[in-house]
Every structure is written in structure tokens, then in C-alpha cells.
Image (tube, rainbow, N blue to C red):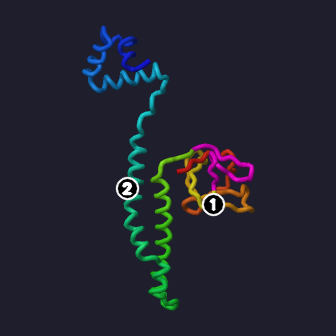
Amino acid sequence: MEFELWLFAVKNLAQTYEMSQVIFGQLPKAEQEDLRKEYRKTVKGEKEAPKENKTLKKIEGLLFDFHNSMNVTERFLERHPLKTLEKQIKPDGENAEQEFAFRMLFELEQSTLKVTSYLAHLAKPVTKEGELRVDQYGQYSLDGTIIMPGMLVEFFYHNRWELGKAARDLLAPFELYFLGMRNEEYHISPDGLRVRLR
């Protein structure tokens, strides 16, 4: 049943089909939306959409802004790659101050590249979510996407989402494990692990 017919036949909004449309058009927007929700719920069988999480939206907005603000840093690192700088500057191994400054510059570059990659990941929408399964070749996959070393994967562990890079090691307890943002290792059984990809 169409919404317009439902207004006339079920809600008895007016004595004629045409007049029910006129009356509906004159209702306040809030009442119109309430009628549409009732129609979707009773006729279409749709469940009410969960209320928008304003706090989550705000946090996601901050992450997005953080990601955008890193563009300046990325451009700086592109213009001044340390491998090239090292050849140009030629740090003197015997000069402790020079060695310290260059080492700090290198550490900060590495940290920044890591932060940038995580922010770029979080700026994307979730494309797949479900449980990891072992395929016929012994590889872990989610709906046909094989989890490869180096991939950023979000996984549900101890009732919260974690983010880590997939890594493989034949000597690890489950072969596949995850390296967290602070280089912590998550050696948990991947089979049936709830994950999501972006």
C-alpha cells in the first residue's frame, strides 16, 4: 500500500483521497514525519532507526579534522625526505649534538608517518564487518577479503574495538596476530574473531 493511500484509507485523514493529500501538505513538518514513521513501521515493517549518537559524530568529526590537519605535515615530509637529507647533511658521527638532533628528527618522522596512516584509515567508512574464517588454503579472510600482513584491521577484543596491523609469524601461537598502535602484540585466535575493515 502506498503512503498516500494509507493516509486516506487507514488514517482517514479526509473524506476523499485528494483532500487527504492537501491536508497532509498543510501539516507541520514534525507531524508529517511522525505519520511517515508510523507508515514505515506498520506497513513496511521497518524498525525505528537508532537515535543519532551526537558524541560519536563529534569524535568522528575531530578525527576527520585531525586527519586533514596532518596534510601540512605530510607535505613537509614529502619535501624533506630524511633519506635525501641524510645524504645532503651528512651527520658527523662524532658530534653528539648533531647526532641527537638528526636521530630525533628521524624518530619524529617515523611517529608522524604512523599517526598519518592510522588517521587515514579511520577517515574511511567501514566496508566489511563480520567473523574471520580460515579458507581452504589456511588463510584468514572476511567475506572473501584475505587478511594480509600490514593491513590495518579493527578487531573486537575484551568488549572493545582495537586497531592493529596484521602480522604473520609461523612461530606465533596462531600464526596471524595483530600489532597495536603502541607495538603491543595481540596473540588471539583469529578464527571467529569479530573484525571490521575500512
Query: Which sits in the foreground, 116 or 6?
Result: 6
Query: Which sits in the foreground, 60 or 37?
Result: 37
Residue 137: x, y in percent? 74, 53
Q: Quadrant of residue 10?
A: top left
Q: Residue at x 63, y 47 (%)?
A: 142
Q: Residue furthest left?
A: 26
Amino acid residing under circle 2: Asp
Q: Is residue 27 above or below residue 90?
A: above
Q: Which mark is residue 126?
A: none
Q: Quadrant of residue 63?
A: bottom left
The boundaries of the magenta stretch are: 129-147
Q: Is residue 40 magenta?
A: no
Residue annotated with mark 1: 149
Residue 148: x, y in percent? 63, 58
Q: Quadrant of residue 150?
A: bottom right
Q: Residue at x 56, y 51 (%)?
A: 154
Query: Which sits in the foreground, 14 or 77?
Result: 14
Residue 75 placement, left or right of 131:
left
Q: Which mark is residue 65?
A: 2
Mark 1 neighbour density, 10 Å: few (under 14) some (14–19) many (20 or more): some
Residue 110 placement, left or right of 63:
right
Residue 75 placement, left or right of 19:
right
Amino acid residing under circle 1: Pro
Q: Residue furthest front?
A: 18
Q: Marks 2 and 1, Cα distance to the nearest angstrom?
A: 28 Å
Residue 127: x, y in percent? 53, 47
Mark 2 neighbour density, 10 Å: few (under 14) some (14–19) many (20 or more): few
What is the secondary structure assignment of the residue under circle 1? loop
Q: Is residue 104 above or below residue 146?
A: below
What is the secondary structure assignment of the residue under circle 2? helix
Q: Is residue 104 above or below residue 49?
A: below
